Amino acid sequence: MARPDKWGEEKLAPFPIHSEAGLADQPERIEMTLLQSAAIAVYRSLAIHHPRWLCRLKMLGGNSVVEDREFWKFYTTLLREGAVVQPLEDFFNLYQLVLRTRNLPGDIAELGVYRGGSAKLIASLKGEKGLYLFDTFAGMPSVRADVDTHLEGDFDDTSLEAVSSYLRGFNRVFFHKGLFPDSAGELAKTPITFSLVHLDADIYESTRAGLNFFYPRMVKGGMIVSHDYRSLTCPGVKRAFEEFFADKPEAVIELWKTQCLVVKQ
Ligand SMILES: C[S@@+](CC[C@H](N)C(=O)[O-])C[C@H]1O[C@@H](n2cnc3c(N)ncnc32)[C@H](O)[C@@H]1O
């Protein structure tokens, strides 16, 4: 396969490269050893220059994902920018879901933005839809020790200024800084609807609050996708989904690698 285009290479992010998709689902928790740094460098280099080899290594040989030049443009650009904290598989699913919900009415929301990696993927593909981004931009809020493994303050190496600068140039991107759902504030009083919601809050209360807020505002056929539903390090996410959908008609569909998907009836 030809080397992917150098899409967006000139638009380098203000963040240092700090993590790698596919090697570490929770890179911020990892003490970066020399060996890990070397492995990450090899992964990055393969993803950027030889995606076909990377796919073979990940046992994805023979899969048409490797032929999807548009996807690899986004993935490699965000890797270069150090913005990817999601595994390759989850990143691809999100890419597909943005594309497949584009023709539905309604806007898009993301709860859990951090440095804006997944938000940039969505913003790049959303067309004229509004993208509503919710985060404290100051780290994880308080967690429930009985069901969460994250700690308050995790993911605090970001800021609203840096993320809005990273996403400058995209139209109709709206930032809601602060503790969700309080940060939804005025939006809650409007008749807004959503075609796609990306939940990536990692913890029980936030995921539950996200479902409470977004589910009734989803259009028919709209999709809620959550990262970390299957992550053993984020049991609160799965708990929140199981409780919330216990009395709802929709199935919670488990995806490879960590996500789950719900299609609103
Ligand atoms: C894993 S990070 C998001 C990563 C991002 N989606 C990406 O792929 O680049 C989780 C984020 O959720 C945010 N978060 C969790 N609960 C929240 C809440 N109740 N209100 C606002 N932000 C929250 C944290 O501040 C953190 O930045």
Image: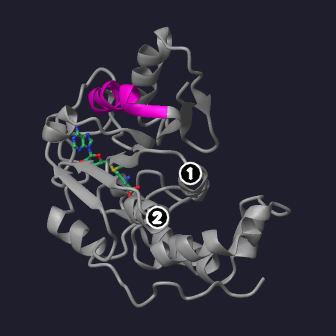
Which of disc 2 and disc 1 is earlier in sequence? 1
As drawn, 40 above or below 94: below
Q: Residues within 10 Å of mark 1 (few under 14, many from 20)?
A: few
Q: How is the image coloured?
A: one colour
Task: State yes or no: residue 210 in magenta.
Answer: yes
Q: Position of residue 128 (x, y in %)?
A: 41, 62
Label 2 amino acid?
Gly
Query: At 61% from the left edge and 51% from the top edge, which residue is drawn?
Result: 100
* SS at mark 2 in the image: loop
Helix, strand or loop for the magenta stretch, by majority: helix
Q: Nearer the viewer, residue 20 or 194?
A: 194
Residue 127, which numbered label?
2
| Cα distance in 3D space between marks 1 and 2 | 10 Å
First to last magenta residue range? 205-219
Label 2 packing within 10 angstroms: few (<14), some (14-19), many (20+): some
> In the picture shown, does residue 8 fall above or below 246?
below
* Quadrant (top left, top right, bottom left, bottom right) of the N terminus: bottom right
Residue drawn at the location 61% of the way across and 32% of the way down: 254
Query: Which amino acid type is marked by label 1?
Result: Asn
Q: Is residue 181 visible?
A: no
Image marks 1 and 2: residues in contact by CB distance under 8 Å: no
